[in-house]
Image (cartoon, rainbow, N blue to C red):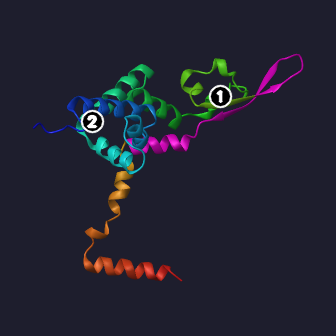
Amino acid sequence: MAKRVKAGTSKAAASTRKALFAKAYLANGMNGVRAALTAGYKPGVGASKAAARMSSDVIVQRLIAEGAEKTSKIAGLSVERTLAEIARLAYSDPRRFYDEGGNLIPVHKLDDDTAATVAAVEIEELSGGTGKLKKIKHWDKNAALEKAMKYHGLYEKDNSQKRSILQMTDDELIASIAAARLLVP
């Protein structure tokens, strides 16, 4: 007598579920549980376990990577372009918004690098339906610099100075605990 196969467990069904999971994972903002539900897994613990299992599956990881790359190409996203935009913000110079007389340059006359740093423009309404440029708000330069520093691995140097408890000798661990006790009132 042939062994009975549970419904939805064939290789074809598993392959279909993997593809559905990968597609849903990308579509829903990379939420594994929601992707598992979309792929047909039961709500609750079943979906959570399936999400963990699917996320570690090599085939699913490849499908997700291929889908993300395809989506990035369609959207025009690339590492080079992203880094160029971060550099525009990180190295922006507010003096480029003004002419020689100290007047704000109209937004439509800004060069591309300077215009890319603009987050918002505030215009003062004047009589007759015209407007006068009043304020330009920039994107956060500190955030851009932080992202550039992370990309260049500059935080890794700082993090390497912090030692794990597991890496400490017994004497170093005792000294660290004693120092921490001094901080507690």
Whole-Å distance between the Cαs marked 2 and 1?
Answer: 66 Å
Q: Amino acid at mark 1?
A: Phe
The question of residue 102 being in magenta is answered with no
Measuring 40% from the left and 45% from the top, which residue is drawn there?
150
Q: Quick one: quadrant of the N terminus?
A: top left
The question of residue 130 being in magenta is answered with yes
Q: Find residue 161 and report its horizontal and vertical position in percent.
A: 34, 62
Would you call the spot at circle 2 few (<14 residues within 10 Å), some (14-19), or many (20 or more)?
Answer: few
Q: Find residue 76 and report its horizontal and vertical position in percent.
A: 43, 21
Q: Quadrant of residue 136?
A: top right
Mark 2 or mark 1: which comes first in sequence? Answer: 2
Residue at image mark 1: 97
| Camera-nearest residue between 97 and 67 | 67
| Camera-nearest residue between 9 and 53 | 9
Write down the region rendered in magenta. Answer: 123-151
> Is 156 left or right of 86, judged from the image as shown?
left
Question: For residue 7, which numbered disc appears in the image?
Answer: 2
Measuring 36% from the left and 47% from the top, which residue is drawn there?
46
Q: Secondary structure at mark 2?
A: loop
| Camera-nearest residue between 48 and 167 | 48
Measuring 56% from the left and 27% from the top, which residue is drawn there?
116
Q: Secondary structure at mark 1?
A: helix
Number of callouts: 2
Measuring 58% from the left and 34% from the top, which residue is drawn there?
93
Q: Quick one: quadrant of the C terminus?
A: bottom right
Relative height, residue 75 to residue 172 (above, below): above
The residue most toward the left is 1
Question: For residue 83, which numbered disc appears in the image?
Answer: none
Q: Are marks 2 and 1 in contact (CB under 8 Å)?
A: no
> Is 20 left or right of 123, judged from the image as shown?
left
| Camera-nearest residue between 100 and 173 | 173
Viewer-nearest of labels 2 and 1? Answer: 2
